[in-house]
Image (spheres, grey):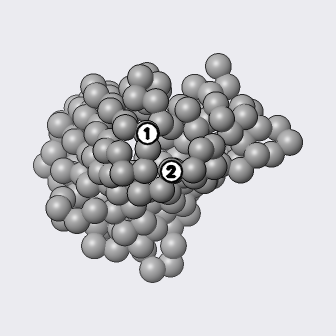
């Protein structure tokens, strides 16, 4: 089961999980828009309606999803839109992108998502770090539980 940890300075949330699939398979699931749409919001707390990923350094990405009910809205937002730019792209080991989300406390300020994939004897160790959250207290609270769910969805998808 995936668990997340928050840094003492409240800037970043990190989560890890072991996936019984090679790094190439996991990296593809993180960078292919069709797969992202399929697994990211399929059984999660929000239904993904759009996932676009121009998988290359400098490429743009965009996601849209909807809260399943009004009480699941964040900062008064229930139609979620996030996007950004891919800052580092080193298949199948590293993917880093900016993350700008309309439900953030400060929606114009980008945060950073970093995916690190390390081969293991049984597959891949996946580590995700979402940083730049010091000034995003409400969003940070949601991410502390949300990233563990995303990791579990990724694991289920890649191991199918």
Q: Which image quarter is the C terminus in?
A: top right
In the image, 101 versus 86, the foreground residue is 86
CB contact under 8 Å: marks 2 and 1: yes
Residue 42 position in % (x across, y down):
42, 24
Residue drawn at x 65%, y 35% is: 24
The residue lying furthest to the top in this view is: 160
Compute the Cα span from label 2 to label 1.
8 Å
Q: Is 69 on the left or on the right of 147, as rendered?
A: left
Pointer 1 local density, CA inside 10 Å: few below 14, some 14–19, many at least 20: some
Whether residue 30 is situated above or below residue 145 in the rendered picture: above
Residue drawn at x 57%, y 25% is: 157
In the image, 61 versus 2, the foreground residue is 61
Residue at mark 1: 55
Circle nearer the N terminus (2, 1): 1
Residue at mark 2: 89
The residue lying furthest to the right in this view is: 121
In the image, 94 versus 18, the foreground residue is 94
The residue lying furthest to the left in this view is: 76
Q: Which image quarter is the N terminus in?
A: top right
Q: Is 2 on the left or on the right of 99, as rendered?
A: right
Residue drawn at x 63%, y 49% is: 93
- Identify the element where label 2 is drawn: strand
Residue 11 position in % (x across, y down):
41, 72
Residue drawn at x 35%, y 68% is: 133
| Quadrant in which residue 79 is drawn | top left
Residue 114 position in % (x across, y down):
50, 57
Whether residue 133 is situated above or below residue 72 in the rendered picture: below
Residue 61 position in % (x across, y down):
32, 42
> From this viewpoint, is residue 27 visible?
yes
> From this viewpoint, is residue 19 visible?
no
């Amino acid at each position: 089961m995936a668990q997340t940890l928050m840094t003492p300075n409240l800037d970043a949330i990190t989560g890890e999980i072991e996936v019984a699939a090679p790094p190439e398979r996991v990296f593809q699931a993180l960078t292919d828009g069709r797969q992202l749409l399929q697994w990211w919001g399929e059984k999660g707390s929000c239904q993904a309606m759009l996932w676009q990923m121009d998988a290359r350094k400098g490429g743009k990405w965009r996601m849209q999803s909807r809260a399943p009910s009004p009480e699941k809205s964040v900062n008064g937002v229930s139609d979620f839109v996030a996007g950004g730019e891919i800052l580092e792209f080193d298949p199948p080991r590293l993917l880093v992108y900016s993350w700008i989300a309309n439900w953030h406390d400060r929606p114009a300020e980008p945060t950073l998502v970093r995916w690190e994939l390390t081969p293991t004897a049984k597959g891949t160790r996946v580590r995700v770090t979402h940083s730049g959250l010091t000034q995003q207290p409400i969003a940070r609270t949601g991410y502390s539980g949300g990233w563990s769910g995303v990791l579990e969805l990724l694991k289920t998808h890649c191991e199918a």
